[in-house]
Amino acid sequence: MVRESKRSGRETALSADRIIEAALRISDAEGDIDRLTVRRLAADLGVGTMSLYSYFRSKDEILDGMADHVLGRMQLPPEPDAGPAGALRTVGHAFLALMREHPSVMRLFATRVTSSRVALRGAMEAALARLVDAGIPGQQAARCYGFLLTYAIGFASYQKPRPWGRGDRAASAEERRQRTHFYASLPIDEFPHVVELAGDIAGLPSDEQFDAGLEAYIDATLRTLQHARA
């Protein structure tokens, strides 16, 4: 009787937001939305599976809700950007921060298309507005948006299983040193270039590498804009 009372209390406190937050917590911890099941989600929340169906008709609806929750809350700094270059950096780093905070979003982007106004407003309209307001023409702004989004998804996907690239982790320096040693210790007659560039290769998943790629794209975009105005 006591157990039933507690369960009823939990189910009474259940909400769509609480379900989505739990789903994100599980998916981000696993790094894979395929590991998320309705049964596991219900167990995490301490409710029966049928309780979840009162809010979402299927796992697909839960996944859509996860995308809405994350994309609709993408944060862009309130300060105005210093021209096109500043806007490109702002949006690029915002996308990377989003992928890092919620790794499962990378799979959501790769497997689903959202038509949610909440998601479109947070992760598309706001980003496009920053680019256009900074002086990037509409068509070019859309192309920049597409590049920055896919670049962040690709880089975050590459970096995730290579945590020594993260500059915000205390253990990164030692892990990077060990990885450099691994490459440098390979047979030089078989891997001459890998051995020579061991430190640079170990740094490929680093934050500096992301910035280098971003700056290269910014330089190319600025040249394109300058040429168009000539």
Image (cartoon, grey):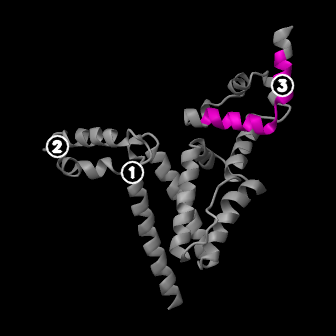
Judge from the rendering whether residue 107 lies leftward or rightward of residue 120; answer left or right.
left
Q: Which residues are magenta?
A: 6-27
Q: Residue at coordinates 80% horizontally, 29% vertically from top-left?
A: 52
The label number, if any, that marks residue 11 in the structure image: 3
Q: In the rendering, at what x and y percent does residue 18 appear?
A: 76, 35
Q: Is residue 155 visible from the viewing direction of this image? A: yes
Q: Residue at coordinates 41% horizontally, 68% vertically from top-left?
A: 216
Residue at image mark 1: 206
Residue 152 in the image: above or below residue 45: below
> Label 3: how many residues lie within 10 Å, few (<14), some (14-19) or many (20+)?
some
Q: As drawn, which residue projects farthest toward the bottom? A: 230
Front one among 174 and 156: 174
Give the CA separation, mark 3 to mark 2: 62 Å
Residue at image mark 2: 190
Front one among 230 and 97: 97
Judge from the rendering whether residue 105 lies leftward or rightward of residue 114; answer left or right.
left
Q: In the rendering, at what x and y percent does residue 146 appear?
A: 58, 63
Local secondary structure at mark 2: loop
The label number, if any, that marks residue 221 in the structure image: none
Local secondary structure at mark 1: loop
Q: Residue at coordinates 52% horizontally, 71% vertically from top-left?
A: 86
Indicate which disc, 2 or 1, sits on the residue closer to the N terminus: 2
Q: As drawn, which residue projects farthest toward the top? A: 1
Give the CA separation, mark 1 to mark 3: 44 Å
Give the CA separation, mark 2 to mark 1: 26 Å
> Label 2: how many residues lie within 10 Å, few (<14), some (14-19) or many (20+)?
few
Residue 170 in the image: above or below residue 54: below
Amino acid type, callout 1: Ser
Q: Is residue 152 magenta?
A: no
Indicate which disc, 3 or 2, sits on the residue closer to the N terminus: 3
